[in-house]
Image: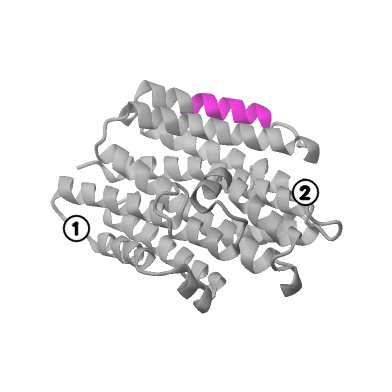
Amino acid sequence: MLLGRTANGLYWMHRYIERAENMARIVDAGLRMALTRTSNASEEWSSVVSSAGVRQGFCERHKQFTAATVSDFLLRDPDNPSSVISCIETARVNARMVRTALTRDAWEAVNEGWMALKEVLAHPIPESDLPPVLDRIKRETSLIRGAFHGTMLRNEIYNFARIGTCIERADNTARILDVKYYVLLPAISYVGTTIDNYQWESILRSVSAHRSYRWVYDAQYKPAQIADYLILDGRMPRSLNFSYRNIVENLNYLAEDYGQRHVCHNSAERTLSSLKGTKVDAIFDVGLHEFLSDFIDHNNRLGAEIAEIYNFD
């Protein structure tokens, strides 16, 4: 059985790599949606900070929600543990701790990504330069993931890494959806307008789902269809359903290897079953914000259960 310390390092290494990419995606979503407004863009940037779950920390350091303050806090601030620079630093620390469990290619991808992003994020980024910087962050994290997937043995090392990635990814998709539907929609009169449709399109682009959505629906941007795609479609690799299918699958591999099931297996399977057994209309009847808030809470609890059961130090 893998040592708890090693399992912890692999799990959190991949959570932080995913979180670094997710922060870039959240900033990207905010940037795209702020561009659709002619006034009061601070509301969009305020909601981005809320979505990232760092509002208290931001307000302790900044008084205004602007592209400059928010992007700097989410991308470059070393005192923000969820900033891209903090995440990639923490991911590298964890990778170094479990270096003997990684292939050479996987370790070098982490180390080179860390060096590249330290250079890119060394200085404040003008708003006009944000798009290429955000693309660079997404590219570097994808290279790390690609090296890991392409060279690692499919054993418990791989399982803990995939579980960490998918728990973090599910959290991010839920948060991005929540920001759009609950916070950013300015008024009911905007529903179905050009502004509303552009914002939904921006959400799809921020999770790299714009083109694949068109393949599936071949239709205009409809809130119910987009929510259905990002929550319930098991083919979409950033959807909640896809993430939980992978979490359950990898937890089951651990159960087979170790000969024992735990409460976390039941928790993950209940969440997956609820995602498979519901329709998007039922989610909207309950309230999308309420559904997503409950999902985020359950997802966080699952992470805590896994850490306790597998003796993460």
The first of marks 2 and 1 along the sequence is 2
Q: Secondary structure at mark 1?
A: loop
* Residue that carries the numbered disc 1 in the rendered image: 261
Image location (x, y in percent) of residue 16:
49, 43
The residue singled out by tag 2 in the image is: 67
Per the image, is 118 magenta?
yes
Residue at 78%, 50% in the rendered image: 35
Do the numbered discs 2 and 1 sit on residues whose CB atoms are within 8 Å?
Answer: no
Quarter containing the N terminus: top left
Residue found at the very far right of the displayed protein: 39
Where is residue 173 drawn, in percent x and y? 52, 55
Q: Say if 2 sits above or below 146 in the image.
A: below
Q: Secondary structure at mark 2?
A: helix
Does 93 appear in magenta?
A: no
Camera-nearest residue between 55 and 293: 293
Most common SS among magenta residues: helix
Residue 182, can we see it?
A: yes
Position of residue 11 measured from the top left corner of the image (x, y, whole percent): 38, 44
Task: State the colouring used for the structure image.
Answer: one colour
What residue range appears in magenta?
110-120
| Residue at x 43% of width, y 30% of height | 146
- Residue at the bottom extreme of this rendering: 285
Which residue is rendered at x = 36% and y = 33% of the image?
98
Task: Return the x and y of residue 299 as percentages of the image width and height.
Answer: 42, 61
Q: CA distance from mark 2 to mark 1?
A: 47 Å
Kindly identify the residue that appears in the image at 49 percent across and 50 percent down: 216
Quadrant of residue 46 in the image?
Answer: bottom right
Choose between 251 and 176: the one closer to the eye. 176
Amino acid of disc 1: Arg
Depth order, front residue of 271/297? 271
Left or right, 313 with respect to 169, comes to left
Say which amino acid is labelled 2: Ala
